[in-house]
Image: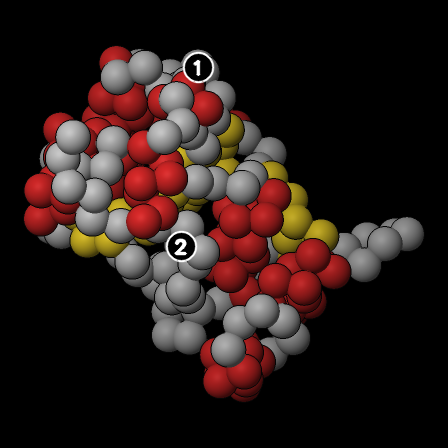
Amino acid sequence: MPAIADARLLALAQKPRTARRLAIVAEAEHRQSVVAVLTALAAAGYDVAGLPADFAGLEARLDASEGETIMLNDYAAFCATLPVTLRDAVAARWGAAERDSHYRPGQVDCGRFIVPALRLGTVAVIAAGIATVPPRHDALAGVAWITDTFRADVVISWRPLGVDLPVPVLIASTDDAADTASLLAALDGDATALGRWRVT
């Protein structure tokens, strides 16, 4: 068996591919690569239900999706686990979470964030917004949904998420089309494949 590069990937490699929960985070300019990744995952035996046929199909599904939600109190609990310096920076730059454009007030509850996510079996595609430093509340809400609600085993992204996660995040090394062969090998714990995918 190939050398294992990360203990978290070792744990992932022990799970059947059909049971692995993957979150793919990508901006609009990387959606073509997302289709390539989804196609490769499906061919390798991952549970990718309702695989879009092409880039246009993925865009249409994302546009039509109502998204996922995370309650404000759950978001607050997630934020409480973040470093104080990051929480303070987010509050100073972006204000209260309730002021975020993705927040929806509730009539009988504390309200919720809408996360632009599309579930395809055990794989979720999350449409990322423009990266900011510090991250906006909606970006952090997306991360909270990935880890606490969707409970991803691994995240695939084309940029850092702005916060450390307890699960491995595989980041593409270039802006070119995703190297799906290396990605599949990395998900199976092959340390040599991580030369093309940075793990955080």
Position above or below: 157 against 14: below
Marker disc for residue 50: 1
Q: Is residue 107 left or right of residue 21?
A: right
The location of residue 151, given as percent across then percent down, is: 54, 41
Of residues 90 and 156, the one drawn nearer to the viewer in this rendering: 156
Does the image show residue 54?
A: no
Q: Which image quarter is the C terminus in? A: bottom left
Q: Give the image location of residue 75, x and y in percent.
A: 65, 60
The residue pinned by badge 2 equals: 129
- Please state if 180 lies on the left or on the right of 75 as rendered: left
Residue under the point 26% across and 14% down: 43
Q: Quadrant of the N terminus?
A: top left
The amino acid type found where label 1 is placed reads: Gly
Q: CA distance from mark 2 to mark 1?
A: 24 Å
Residue 56 appears at what percent x and percent y? Answer: 31, 24
User: Are there few (<14), some (14-19), or many (20+) residues within 10 Å of tag 2?
Assistant: some
Q: Nearer the viewer, mark 2 or mark 1?
A: 1
